Amino acid sequence: MTRRHLAPILFTAMTIPAQPIDRTKPPETPPLPAFRLPPVAEAALPNGLQVVLVEDRRFPLVTLRLGFQAGSKFDPKELPGLAEATAALLTEGTQTRSARQIAEEAASIGGTLSGYASADSLLLAGNALSENLPRLLDLAADVSLNAAFAEDEVKIYKN
């Protein structure tokens, strides 16, 4: 940057703090635009799974949340933290994929896949570029149906 380009920037930077601010009244802000939630579609599958779809085509992304009533309030007294451990270990391997393969496949579709637990629920959450939705669904199905909970991964988690 030359001196000729730097002078207007320095002048502007030096004059901004010198402008008086009237702190007796709040700043004027434009009205907030109305928020409109995209249409919501709900359905129940024959196996009882409740599906909620919120479609917003402004972004080329898809987000998936698979929730179970399995949070920490359901933990047996002798196994506190079971829901949290289960959630953390969901993506650490299945019968056909290692933890590394799960992570690499999620990354290859521009996304992530993780397990989370709260007091009320256990969630498998993922996202990906929308063009990769079938691969995200396949990965999420494998993790939710075939989680291996390998002994070595459980030991690592416990430590």
Image: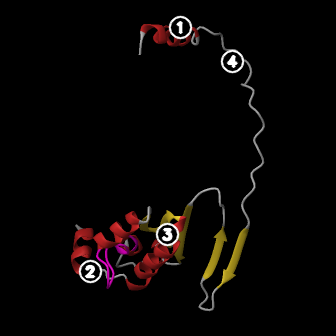
Quadrant of the frame with the C terminus? bottom left
The part of the image, by quadrant, that contains residue 157 is bottom left
Q: For the residue carrying disc 3, how many other residues have a C-alpha within 10 Å: few (<14), some (14-19), or many (20+)?
A: some
Camera-side residue: 125 or 154?
A: 125
- Image coordinates of residue 18 in percent, x first then y, are 59, 8
- Whole-angstrom CA distance, mark 4 to mark 3, is 52 Å
- Image coordinates of residue 81 in percent, x first then y, are 37, 71
Earlier sequence position, callout 4 versus callout 2: 4
Vertical comparison of 143 with 38: above or below: below
Q: Residue at x 46, y 74 (%)?
A: 135
Residue depth check, mark 4 versus mark 1: number of the one nearer the observer: 1
Considering the numbered disc 3 on the image, is that residue within a helix, a strand or a loop? Answer: helix
Q: What amino acid type is highlighted by mark number 4?
A: Arg
Numbered range of the magenta stretch: 87-98
- Whole-angstrom CA distance, mark 3 to mark 1, is 50 Å
> Residue 132 bears which disc, if any?
3
Please report contact status of discs 4 and 3: CB closer than 8 Å, yes or no. no
Earlier sequence position, callout 3 versus callout 2: 3
The part of the image, by quadrant, that contains residue 85 is bottom left
Q: What amino acid type is highlighted by mark number 1?
A: Phe
Q: Is residue 88 magenta?
A: yes
Relative to 133, 34 lies left or right = right
Q: What amino acid type is highlighted by mark number 3?
A: Asn
Q: Residue at x 43, y 76 (%)?
A: 139
> Residue 150 bears which disc, if any?
2
Q: For the residue carrying disc 4, how many other residues have a C-alpha within 10 Å: few (<14), some (14-19), or many (20+)?
A: few
Give the residue pinned by disc 4: 23
Q: Is residue 22 magenta?
A: no
